[in-house]
Image (cartoon, rainbow, N blue to C red):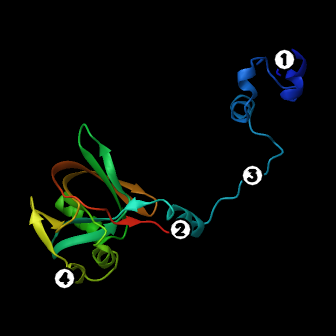
Amino acid sequence: PFNAYNRDTFYGGDHRGYQDHRFRTHAARIILFGADRELLPMTRPTSDRFRTAMASLPTGVTIVATNGEDGPAGATANAVTSLSIEPMLMLACLDRGSRTLLAAQAADRFSISVLHDGQEGVARSFATKAPIAEKWAGVPWSERDGLPAIDDALLWVACDLQDVIAAGDHVILTGAVTDLETATGKPLVFQIG
């Protein structure tokens, strides 16, 4: 039991006037009194370890696409999510060197096709650095609202580009939703581990 007798023992003599038993938890002590000085600092993970760890987080697989000077451009992306309901906004992250990123910025619009579990080949095709025309070869797609859409995708969303935010080795695009189409099925999910 916590009482005035063992308070100083419990807090190591540094209770700083906090005599309430609510502050007995480790997290509360850190917040109130600072971290234990005897603990060794944590080492930073390597980028390979971080990549492997994040691969254990299941994510949907999408194709972010737009129309470019040389025809449709597209890239596989799994860092994609809804951002806001009011207003309706989407968020997609693309590699800084992505040709699709440059095309989306030039077009000021982009689309997102959420793939179903039978479209792994489509995801692999768009994950390469192959020439743009090769990525689209043999992939069933159509144009909707002036933007590319992967046929039979579970979800297709059209967006007007809102923000372009540099973030590490990727760029975050936000887009205002202008149109969408949905279907039923199981999503293609990326997860390792």
In space, the residues marked 1 and 3 are separated at their CA atoms by 33 Å
Considering only order in the chain, which callout, 1 or 4, is on the residue closer to the N terminus?
Answer: 1
Q: Do the residues labelled 2 and 4 touch (CB within 8 Å)?
A: no
Considering only order in the chain, which callout, 2 or 1, is on the residue closer to the N terminus?
Answer: 1
Instruction: Identify the amino acid type marked 4.
Output: Gly
Q: Where is residue 185 in the image (x, y as percent from the top left)?
A: 25, 61
In space, the residues marked 1 and 2 are separated at their CA atoms by 48 Å
In space, the residues marked 2 and 3 are separated at their CA atoms by 28 Å
Q: Where is residue 48 in the image (x, y as percent from the top left)?
A: 57, 70
Instruction: Identify the amino acid type marked 3.
Output: Pro
**Residue 3 - label:** 1
Quick check: 27 left or right of 110? right
Q: Where is residue 34 in the image (x, y as percent from the top left)?
A: 74, 35
Q: Name the residue tied to disc 3.
A: 41
Q: Name the residue tied to disc 4.
A: 138
Quick check: 154 left or right of 144? right
Considering only order in the chain, which callout, 4 or 3, is on the residue closer to the N terminus?
Answer: 3
